[in-house]
Amino acid sequence: MSVKELEKTATLEHAGDGHYHGDGILGEQFETIEQQNTSYLIGMWAFIVQEVLFFGAIFTAYAIYRFKYVLEFTLAHHELSVPIGTLNTFVLLFSSYTMARAVRAAMQNRHKKQAFYLFLTFLFAGVFMVNKYFEYGAKFEHHLFPGGDYSAHAVVEHAEKKGELRVVEEDGKEFYELGRTRNGEFTPLQKVSAQEFEQRTRLFFGFYFVMTGLHGLHVLVGMIIIGILIGRAWIDHLKNKPIADFMPVEMTGLYWHLVDIVWIFLFPLLYLIGR
Amino acid sequence: MAGHSDSHVHPVSLYTRTLYWLMVLLILTVVAGYIPNVPNWLGVVIALTIAVWKATIVIMNFMHVRFSGKLAWLFAGAGFFWLIIMLAFAFADYVSRPWEPFHGWPE
């Protein structure tokens, strides 16, 4: 007898007694396990839609400001480390895979395997957060956190070295010419005052910290939920439970894939474009 | 398997294939980011195309939307539809009108 059939019989045997619905999986308000699962899924999708729009609003704001201050944002882009970003994307994509495998194991009621894949997911999320910690640390060190001691100094220095910025002085005031160097010849495209440049690159790092910070917060929340699920799966394994509700894992999976998708967009938009 | 159920167990190959493509696309997007002398707009288009592609296979395969009922499709679709409305309308406004303070704006 397959697990699916077992689940069905369990549901049918106890339906109607009002106390014991198929191993405690089926809620009283539902007729069938399918109906319950669909309800769960739709609720989760409604939450995901809300999350998409929540992040979407910040993406929209970022896109508008990048469109307006494209040269300043491009120079600020260069301060982000592509190797770390790539590694983090790799780690997160891989964690999405292990999460999908955990959901699959949960559907098959293979609790030990489920716990194993959830643990891998948790581990990858941990690696992501550790990388982020070092990345943030480096930004703070270079005064690129848009707080009290923010300074565009590092951006100016790097851009000057790469021939994409030239410092000019006019009437005792500092200006930056932003442009390109081709064959040793500098072509200015735009002139901004040092103050404007500082404000605009600061805006970029504001977006960087808000977007990656909110994303990191989602990763942390995911880690907590995954941690709880690991414990539950392990208990199910020790108790040799024949059937457990896989929906909590499935819904956490949906959430985790959403977190992955947000990063899929954050990575090229913050780290890659304009290089 | 007797009866109909939404909770099909999919073969492992579905997930490994998805992971494989995600990795290929990740390498592709990083490499594309380093091609010299690509105009800014083209770089954005390439990066976003690959990102949408990656997101689509995650939604379809990892999130099982491909195998889900119409209601799940409706919800998943609605989210992205509204996102497009937000982006399109916001941009339509910002590109078609001057930013404040614009030239001649009273001091």
Image (tube, grey):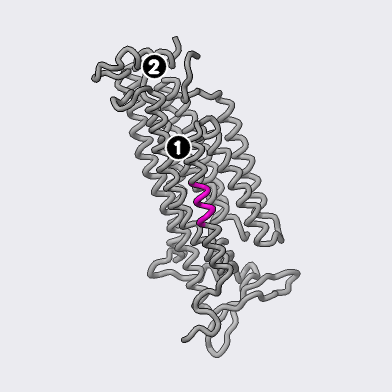
Residue B73 - label: none
Residue A110 placement, left or right of B83: left
Report the chain holding disc 2: A
Based on the picture, tell me whether residue B80 belongs to the magenta stretch. yes
Quadrant of the image occupied by residue A209: bottom left
Q: What residue is disc 1 on? A: A254
In which quadrant of the rendered view does residue B98 lie?
bottom right
Q: Is residue A246 above or below residue B93?
A: above
- Residues A71 and B96: in front is B96
Q: Which of the two discs, 1 and 2, sits closer to the camera? A: 2
Q: Is residue A199 above or below residue A9?
A: below
Q: Position of residue A85 (x, y in %)?
A: 54, 50
Where does the C terminus of chain A fall, quadrant-wise?
Answer: bottom right
Magenta stretch mostly in which secondary structure?
A: helix
Magenta stretch in the rendered image: B79-86
Q: Which residue is mark 2?
A: A7
Which residue is depicted at the point 41% across and 20% down? Answer: A109
Sequence order check, earlier mark of 1 and 2: 2
Question: Which amino acid type is shown beneath numbered disc 1?
Answer: Leu
x 62%, y 52%: residue: B47
Mark yes or no: residue A134 visible. no
Please tell me whether mark 2 sits on a helix, a strand or a loop: helix
- Residue B15, visible in the rendered structure: yes
Q: Nearer the viewer, residue A213 or B53?
A: B53
